[in-house]
Amino acid sequence: MLKLLIPVLCKAGALEAARHAAFLFAEKCVGQVELIEVLDEVGEGRALAFQSRAALRHHEKQSMRDALVKTCAVLDDAGVPYTWKRTFGPTAKTIAAYAAIRGSDVMLLDASGLGLFRRWRVLAGLSRLSPVPIMMLR
């Protein structure tokens, strides 16, 4: 059985990836699912001129937590065993490193909530850095 890694990258969550994982679990293809929530470091953008770094980080954590709750609800309803971890850093590097360390067999990337440029950037980075095959859902 496969060990599936699902990165949660945006406020829309990874609902399509969770639904696909639930289907694969029901078909006895997937034995374990790992969710990784990747938060970018708060940069030196314009928002820092109006809000503190702590306030921006809190807002990002809150919106990503809502996305994670929706994604986890799909897996819970299907009875899929999963674990999750929150981490900070550059998206592609962080996910690729986590996949290598945890020994994931397949990465399931839900790109439906990502814009075209970010989708391309993440997929290009992951395909270059990750030793794990990537399935992208749109």
Image (cartoon, rainbow, N blue to C red):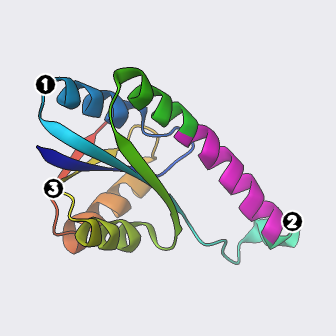
Report, in whole angstroms, how far the alpha carbon at label 3 lies from the one at label 1: 17 Å
Residue under pointer 3: 105
Q: Is residue 61 above or below residue 82?
A: below
Foreground of the two, 101 or 67: 101
Q: Is residue 56 above or below residue 22?
A: below
Report, in whole angstroms, how far the alpha carbon at label 1 lies from the one at label 2: 48 Å
Foreground of the two, 76 or 133: 76
SS at circle 3: loop
Which residue is at a point 20% across and 23% down the rendered structure image?
26
Asked if the residue at tag 3 contacts the one at tag 2, i.e. Cβ–Cβ closer than 8 Å, the answer is: no
Q: Which residues are magenta?
A: 54-68
Q: Is residue 5 left or right of residue 115?
A: left
Which residue is at a point 27% across and 72% down the rendered structure image?
101
- What's under tag 2, amino acid-wise? Gln
Residue under pointer 2: 51
Report, in whole angstroms, how far the alpha carbon at label 2 lies from the one at label 3: 41 Å
- What's under tag 3, amino acid-wise? Asp
Q: Is residue 130 left or right of residue 61?
A: left
Residue under pointer 1: 27
- Residue 76, by quadrant, is top left
- What's under tag 1, amino acid-wise? Glu
Q: Nearer the viewer, mark 2 or mark 3?
A: 3
Give the mark nearest the N terminus, 2 or 3.
2
Residue 69, percent across and down? 56, 36
